[in-house]
Amino acid sequence: MDIAVNTMNPETLVADLARNGRRAQTVLARMSDADRADALHAAASALRADEATILEANAGDIAAGEAAGLTGAMLDRLRLDADRLSAIADAVDAVADLTTPVGQMISRDERPNGLVLERVRIPIGLIGIIYESRPNVTADAAALCLKSGNAALLRGGSEAVRSNRAIEASFARGLESAGVPAAAIQLMPTQDRAAVGAMLKAAGLIDMIVPRGGKGLVARVQADARVPVLAHLDGICHTYVHSAADPAKARALAVNAKMRRTGICGAMETLLLDAAFSEASALVGDILDAGCELRGDERAQKLDPRIKPATDEDWDAEYLDAILSVAVVDDIDGALAHIAAHSSGHTDVIITEDVDVAEQFLNEVDSAIVMVNASSQFADGGEFGLGAEIGIATGRLHARGPVALEGLTTYKWLVRGTGQTRP
């Protein structure tokens, strides 16, 4: 059904979109996994075929972003090129080929009275996704929702509106060619902020909201939502270089964790250096030479005169830029205390050759992702073998870490009897 956007208030618009999405979801639920996979492969092919159109739209967003004064890191998150668009299409293909959790039996039990109880995974229903900056989220979220039998209502940021619309149109064309209703994946047709508020209040129509963006967006969603929220908070990711770290390994990992891509949520934002690590000066020198500004405590500043003094706010900052806070800690306990005080619960890393210390770190750091001797930039659903992700959930309920297919399902009980009555 066509929706005349200009004639509707936000609540009516969202309600109509949601009802269309829910009808489409019932069709998705009846489709076989093979049919949903075929539809996603068709969508990936459409993205490749429409490369010129999508990149032209993205160029418009980049030009508008530059005129608006977006930072280099924000522009990097926004920018598409042929390689990045190819990677987006490849991710859609990868999701298509994953084993779906829908229909998976979680448990089965036969009671003494003969009742057979099963728990099986099912789609959540209609998922609202509110996100900023990165146009790849449009395709990633659409693919994950469709593969898991969910419909999606997407609302991207205004800075990527041209790119999002071009990707969504291409994606929808591919899906429709494979028999999937267009309303299974809908992009909000307006950037009116009131439409976001209407999404957050659409209890009974939207089954779950996933916010993916900065602290301000997530805070607003959590404060205003009347729909269950799966929160993706900021990525204040730490790397702790222990005294027993291999120096060459530590230097390579630290530079990669910060500088590979500074604008992603898995980028290191705070470096913790053990006071007994022998090559701390060389390590911070590597990061400085790579073009990163360092802000440190008093002990860190003594390692290199180019390190600026850190403020209290720096320890809780997600820079998403070539800026890094650095602190020197006495030992593993000092590192654990700093992380407990300042981590956002996203991803934290230790670099060490001491197996016992590594296990202590894994056991005691309470974050969604905890790593040993690896770059925090691996905090990504694709790198975890999930095909793509809808976000990194930092809470404790339902799903945690990269949210992919399984995180977009719930379950129901199936009870089979033979005429039992309860005494």
Image (spheres, grey):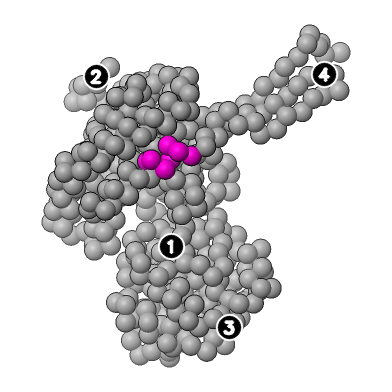
Query: Residue at the location (16% across, 43% down)?
Result: 52
Q: Amino acid at mark 4?
A: Gly
Q: For this view, does 412 lie left or right of residue 259?
A: right
Q: CA distance from mark 4 to mark 3?
A: 60 Å
Label 4 element class: loop
Q: CA distance from mark 1 to mark 4?
A: 51 Å
Start-end of magenta stretch = 92-98
Quarter holding residue 194: top left
Instruction: Assess whether mark 1 and mark 3 are in contact (beta carbons under 8 angstroms).
Output: no
From the image, tell me which residue sits under label 2.
2
Percent from the top left, x then y, of residue 324? 38, 73
For marks 4 and 3 on the same chain, the one whose residue lies earlier in the sequence? 4
Instruction: Assess whether mark 4 and mark 2 are in contact (beta carbons under 8 angstroms).
Output: no
For marks 1 and 2 on the same chain, the one whose residue lies earlier in the sequence? 2
Q: CA distance from mark 2 to mark 4?
A: 51 Å
Instruction: Assess whether mark 2 and mark 3 are in contact (beta carbons under 8 angstroms).
Output: no
For marks 3 and 1 on the same chain, the one whose residue lies earlier in the sequence? 3
Q: Main secondary structure of the magenta part?
A: helix
Identify which residue, 233 or 84, lies in the foreground.
Answer: 84
Bin the neighbour count of mark 3 within 10 Å (Cα to Cα): few under 14, some 14-19, many 20 and up.
many
Q: Nearer the viewer, mark 3 or mark 2?
A: 3
Quarter holding residue 351: bottom right
From the image, tell me which residue sits under label 4.
114
From the image, tell me which residue sits under label 1.
377
Tell me the number on the disc at residue 389.
Answer: none
From the image, tell me which residue sits under label 3.
243
Query: Residue at the location (46% across, 21% down)?
Result: 31
Label 1 element class: helix
